[in-house]
Amino acid sequence: MVPEEANKRYLRPASLKRVKELTTDTQGPVRILCIVVEATEGAALVQDIMDEPGKQGSIKVDVEGTLAVAEKYMLLGNVKMTTGTDGKELRLAVSSSHNIDSLDIKAYKDALALEERINQAFVG
């Protein structure tokens, strides 16, 4: 049986973040939309697809299995700090990955912008 405190941490939704927004202070699960730049079994280097071209952030991720290079994914996980050959680096420990290669990113961004406008209209 899982203690109630441990179970509560899984009840929070993963917030949508840009890679550039991730820090060691990032709390809870996060969700990023990315394209795979490099991949090996259990790890990958991904680049954010929500940022403007030429301004995308990238991050190394630890993932179960292998992600396909040049395909888009929604990754859910927790930010962690690891010590590698280049010193300390920020990584995303992925708990769930979903291929979103068929997602129209422009339409998705438009929907997020509309949601923001609606929220502002109702909240004030």
Image: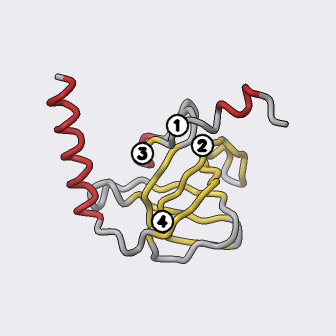
Q: Secondary structure at mark 1?
A: loop
Q: Amino acid at mark 3?
A: Leu
Residue in view at x 46 percent, y 76 percent? 70
x and y, in percent, of residue 18 in the image: 40, 47
Residue in view at x 65 percent, y 51 percent? 93
Counting residues from the start of the chain, the first of labels 3 and 4 encountered is 3
| Crowd around label 3: few <14 · some 14–19 · many ≥20 (10 Å) | some
Q: Amino acid at mark 2?
A: Val
x and y, in percent, of residue 109 in the image: 25, 55
Relative to 110, is 7 on the left or the right? Answer: right
Residue 17 or 104: which is nearer the viewer?
A: 104
Q: Amino acid at mark 4?
A: Tyr
**Front label number (2 vs 3):** 3
Tell me if residue 61 comes above or below residue 13 in the rendering: below
Question: Where on the picture, by quarter, is residue 38?
Answer: bottom right
Instruction: Identify the residue under disc 1.
Output: 23
**Front label number (4 vs 1):** 4
Instruction: Identify the residue under disc 3.
Output: 16
Counting residues from the start of the chain, the first of labels 2 and 3 encountered is 3
Q: CA distance from mark 2 to mark 3?
A: 13 Å
Residue in view at x 72 percent, y 54 percent? 85
Verify CB contact (< 8 Å) between mark 2 and mark 4.
no
Quadrant holding the C terminus: top left
Tell me if residue 69 comes above or below residue 2 in the rendering: below
**Front label number (2 vs 4):** 4
Instruction: Identify the residue under disc 2.
Output: 79
Counting residues from the start of the chain, the first of labels 4 and 1 encountered is 1
Instruction: Identify the residue under disc 4.
Output: 73
Counting residues from the start of the chain, the first of labels 2 and 4 encountered is 4
